[in-house]
Amino acid sequence: MHNKTIAELSAGLKAGEFTSVELTQSYLNRIDSLDEQLNSFITVTPELALEQAKQADAQRATGHVGILNGIPLAQKDIFCTKGVKTSCGSKMLEPFISPYDATTITKFNDSGAIMLGKTNMDEFAMGSSNETSWYGPVKNPWQLDSVPGGSSGGSAAVVAARLAPAATGTDTGGSIRQPASFCGITGLKPTYGRVSRYGMIAFASSLDQAGPMTRTAEDAALMLNVMAGLDSRDSTSVDEAVPDYTADLNNSLSGLKIGLPKEYFSEGLDDAVAKVIESAVKEYEKMGASVKEISLPTSNLAVPTYYIIAPSECSSNLSRIDGVRYGYRCEDPKDLNDLYIRSRGEGFGAEVKRRILVGTYALSEGFYDAYYVKAQKTRRLISNDFNQAFADVDVIMGPAAPSTAFKLGELSDDPITMYLSDIYTIAVNLAGLPGMSIPAGFANGMPVGLQLIGQHFAESKLLNIAHQFQQETDWHTQTPDAFK
Amino acid sequence: MSKLDKSDVEKIAFLARLGVDEQDIPEYATNLSNILDMVEQLDSVDTQGVRPMAHPLDAVQRLRADVVTESNDRENLQAHAPEVEQGLYLVPRVVE
């Protein structure tokens, strides 16, 4: 049962082959027996899940239900879930039982989906390896001494190890696509504003976006159908019609114009990864697509631009967490400053502190124009590059990450090298574009993700391009031996 | 240009009301200096006349009718606070 996709499980539920209670119980059993090796969940919610499953079965018995009815999912612990601990991977929010649901959670609840639990993640989504989580690192199901990527590392590991058919992630600089690449699953970061950010704990508000992490592009389309749409509670969510994302999956790719940015295939890219990406692109040529080299000349500006904008917005966003209204508070504060300083000092981990400090510096008096405004300007240059490229091509392809998953501890003392593992994904967030990573093969025994980048609101096109690849290849069906 | 020393880190940490352990300050100073060196690549980019990008779709703030949409939920929200009394959040005495 655990090797089935959402689409297959939904058909099984519909045909009465099994109930949602049985399905949910089978995933809870897998989590119970296997997650000890991975640490991919912060909180498992068996009682809630079985109660939801019972309701889903009852709903189904009374008539028509949606495709996700009765399907178990794992939710990244960044989404507020009413009555359930929402820690965001931090000691700071260890005591936080959310008083409300994020819009994404409400939408999944309304669709009849089941929540198995909350997945582990880098603290406040700041990290590329899941090692900054206060709850300990997640292990990569393909090789337990390697990282799953981050920040949505728990969600990626859960889907790769078949502990849930699908999960949610969030992506500020690559946090869906890089772990999807490292764990050999399908991950989609939608256009900025496509999915509501309400109740999704903010890291960098002008970049954050939620999306599905699944086995197949078809499942990602089914998830996005539920997640996407305008939300009056998120002023940055976009008033743009939501299509049926499954409608274009079977379109032919004949005549598709693919652009390969030469900057994404230069120094720093692992040779074995490059080979996998090249053969994936050849597969597309066989399907009738044409390929041309393009240039994104400002690619080298993406990481420095991001490491001003993201920490600045993070320092501003996290200033609300002060030990007064919710979350961790230090013992015996002697005055108000002491309360703030020690609660935040004891509650936040090293990487979060680093980013708060960088952001505070960049936004401090006298530096704002030199750093933040300058980065907003280079951000526009990066975005302009993409616009120009899309005048000639339908989709941009390249690696999702410069290497396969690295070893636990390998980069944790070296922040800048760690930041460079997001070198191919960060520009997409700065430009607000949709991007995907899909399984494209293996290098040195570890999965490699092919990144697809589309124009604003081209999610249907990306899902079509991904789905067609998955009709011709079986990389997305590969399962780590220990979790078959 | 951006070599930060111990006193810079202490000053920034205070602005952020962020406790940093004394023994970690040199490491933070090095980390932050390296990050600032990395972002200084942007200094050489000509951005004259480029409009700063605050929103990737250049969207503007959406407005709504000025009507009450939320009900008072104080008890529920304050149930999660470390210390409350009579509907107020408690902090150490500020005014003697």
Image (cartoon, grey):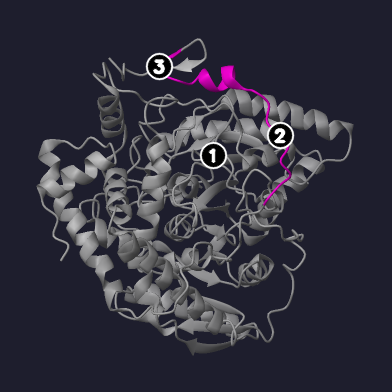
Tell me the crowding category of disc 1: few under 14, some 14 to 19, or many 20 or more residues within 10 angstroms, Cα based. Answer: many
Same subunit, tags 2 and 1: no
Q: Secondary structure at mark 2?
A: loop
Residue position marked by numbered label 2 in the rendering = B69
Q: Amino acid at mark 1?
A: Phe
Q: Is residue A330 above or below residue A210?
A: above
Query: Within the image, what quadrant is residue A272 found in?
Result: bottom left
Tell me the crowding category of disc 2: few under 14, some 14 to 19, or many 20 or more residues within 10 angstroms, Cα based. Answer: few
Same subunit, tags 2 and 3: yes
Residue position marked by numbered label 1 in the rendering = A79
Q: Amino acid at mark 3?
A: Leu
Position in image of residue A210 (x %, y %): 56, 51
Q: Is residue B92 above or below residue B29?
A: above
* Residue range of the region highlighted in magenta in the rendering: B63-84
Quadrant location, the C terminus of chain B: top left
Residue position marked by numbered label 3 in the rendering = B90
